[in-house]
Amino acid sequence: MARQDKIPEVDIIIDHEAGVIRELPQPRLQSRRRRDRRANRAIYTVLVIISVIWLAPFVFLLLQSFRSYLTEDGGMVNYLLPKAFSLDNYRFLFQDPTYIRWYTNTLIIALFCAVFQTAIVLSVSYALSRMRFKGRRFIMQLMLVLGMFPGFLTMIALYFLLKQFGLTQEGAVPGLILIYTASSGMGYYISKGFFDTIPKSLDESARIDGANRFYVFKRIIMPLSKPIVIYTILMAFMAPWGDYVFASYVAFGKSDSYNVAVGLYRWVNTQDYQGYFTRFCAGGVLVAIPITALFLMLQKYYVEGVTGGAVKG
Amino acid sequence: MCPQPFFSSFPRGLDANEEVGDGMADLEYLSLGRGQRRLQDLRRWLISLPKRMGQGALRFVRGLAGLIKKLGLDIADIGQTFVKGDWKTRVSFFIMGFGSFARGQFFRGLLFFLFQAVFFLYILFFGGAYLAKMGTLGTVETSRQGRVTVYGDNSFLILLYGILTLFFILAFLYTWRLNIRQNKISQQILAGGKKLKYARDDVAALADNQFHKTLLSLPMLGLFTFTIVPIIFMILVAFTNYDYTHQPPGKLFTWVGLSNFRTMLSAGSANYGDTFAQVLFWTLTWAFFATFLNYFLGMLVAIMINKKGIRLKKMWRTILVMTIAIPQFVSLLYVSRMFAADGLINSYLISWGWISKPLPFWTDGTWARITIIIINIWIGIPYMMLIATGILMNIPADLYESARIDGANALQTYARITLPYMLFVTGPYLLTSFIGNLNNFNVIYLLTGGSPLSLQLRGNAGYTDLLITWLYKMTVTDSDYKMAAVIGIIVFIITAVISLTVYNMIPSVRHEEDFQ
């Protein structure tokens, strides 16, 4: 985009085939410009409509979170704007020990995952990208095949394994950290793709100077890989906030071990959501704000990771 | 320079350089019309299919023969080592690590010995009993004698620990072989008058030449315990009758062969076949629409934002990216409520007098399916927009310039330059995205939970259930583990078949150099 922007509006054209510089006929240029302007106007209209559609649910969510469940109505109503602006829902959440518990649970899981998962993903992708050893291809093929099994297939077996270690119900938080982390090596593709692009000559010259592999990893590759490290941390941190399936299964019936996703899902679906709907909205807003802020701050790295991954496959 | 369109290169890409057995010359082929060429491509592809399958089978047989040969050589090598070995080596055949220990490699020797000790203790006091019952998965049922519950066999544990024990035995065999090779090598090194490696060298190597072992051991252990063992366990469960009527520790379950697969795939009121067909059909439809609608619409949005002269590019992108940033359980749960019978959309439409009773967004099968696909556009476009933006910027600007001089309009430039380039580069992405959508649990579960349910569907399935959400329901709601396992295996097969077939057709895999 940047490159295209810098190209000036040309009135002359270099015709490579004829080897001459031609001037575009003026009237045609003018009509082209007019047509361009009309096209841009249409595009702006479409973009504005899209933006409205994209943002509307979030604005609605925010608006409804300001409707008091005490003085107005905590359920679903047939109007959008609250009759009176109120912070009752937020006040309730900050005083409700269960919601605070869910929130801290999720935060703890996310922080630990960000550390452990990143360490594992980077280790695996570094080993598979930079080193050549027996069994390397086998490991890659194995992970490819394992990735084709649906993730929830193993739910009961995992539940049982965790139960053996006492990591379900009361121990769901460490249990979930363990599950999320244990298999995270399979998500090595994107960072391996990144490591593959760092020239190998860097490693080799350092090793000739007497550095061992560990030193090369720590001092040479890691500093060059800041974007992918940040991308990995971001992904690892964000995933636990949205996990409902494993979180609800492992924490089964123990409200103290829920994460926000499970807790709020309960509020909307199984409990009397007519009473809890606005509180769900407020709870959702409280989750969405920090995550969204973090994401938008690090958006650049996310885009790099996603595009790199899509192109390399 | 001009790239081939993605779809046109689909079957032709396979045998463009191969000898084709249909007697048609290249020139003849080129003289055909566009549609006829596609037909011809398909024909060639079909003709070459048996040949390629045959080649695959041959490769498999050769691989197997190679493996057997290698195993034979290995056994011969073990024998040789024993015959030529000194007494230290020979004792190591029975007491692992003895040779290493006797030659001064205390650390290695100790590790070998400890492994052997642990293995024998495990088999003797724990694993052996479970392994012995693997054939029946237990025979003694839990019973109550008076007030006391007498626990019998636990089929679940037998299966799980049986698998673990089998793996342990394989690991032991491998380590035993390693121990013997160690002895052989050590003997040779000493005979050559050189020095052996000691613990210090071993540890140093872990940070250098053997660094991959340091890096991979923990991730692989995690993968083994929490992915490989559970997957094998569940694959085996598909061949048992493990469900809520056979739940350990109260009840036993046992092997039933292929009968679960028969129940899943055959028609009739006692079987799941009709429901399965219905769910599979919807899963594939859903994945198709979710992938391609998002793909093209996302690309369109990216092109619009990227167009020269459009301002605030960053702002438009940020607005779209909001749906990625906000956790799905917040956004999707909220949107699902918006479309509910008493939700915002319906109540506003009613209060404006446009409709008299709520639209059945979630209560009618077809409505629910369409609504889901449309809402998924809201979630899915931003990803594609980001990816397309990156790729669009890489398309050489002079391609567009020359197209413009040649008088191509916007649609032609799109069809001849943008689309082929995009399809070429994002082929792998399309594949992963299709597979991802086959298993797109979150969107379905958070929006509808699979409903509306129907009496015509069995196994608690609803109209919007994908195979994966059906699997989830069977596990969590119905405790019908055997059927869940069957679905899991079927999903695996579908994924594998689609991946392998498409992967071989994607031009960016086959013609990596074309665009560089």
Image (cartoon, rainbow, N blue to C red):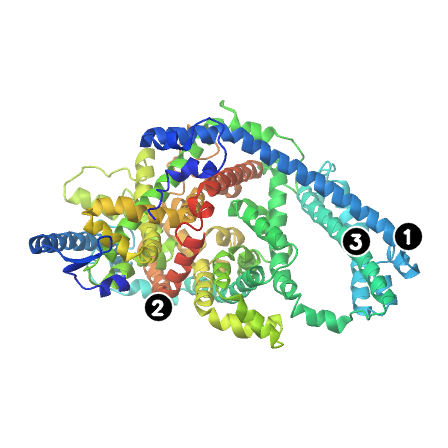
Q: Nearer the viewer, residue A63 or B426?
A: B426
- Residue at mark 3: B177
Query: In the image, residue A269 lies at what x, y percent?
Result: 38, 48
Q: Nearer the viewer, residue A197 or A99?
A: A197
Residue B370 visible in the picture: yes
- Secondary element under disc 1, as helix, strand or loop, is helix
Q: How many neighbours does mark 2 have within 10 angstroms: few (below 14), some (14-19), or many (20 or more)?
A: few
* Circles 1 and 2 on the same chain: no
Q: CA distance from mark 3 to mark 2?
A: 54 Å
* Circles 3 and 2 on the same chain: no
Q: Chain of mark 3?
A: B
Judge from the rendering whether residue B51 lies leftward or rightward of residue B321; answer left or right. Answer: right
- Between discs 3 and 1, the one toward the N terminus: 1
For the residues bearing labels 1 and 2, Cβ distance under 8 angstroms: no
- Identified at 47% across, 67% down, the residue is A229
Query: Which mark lies nearer to you, 3 or 1?
Result: 1
- Secondary element under disc 2, as helix, strand or loop, is helix
**Quarter that holds the N terminus of chain A:** bottom left
- The number of discs equals 3
Query: In the image, residue B354 lies at what x, y percent?
Result: 15, 40
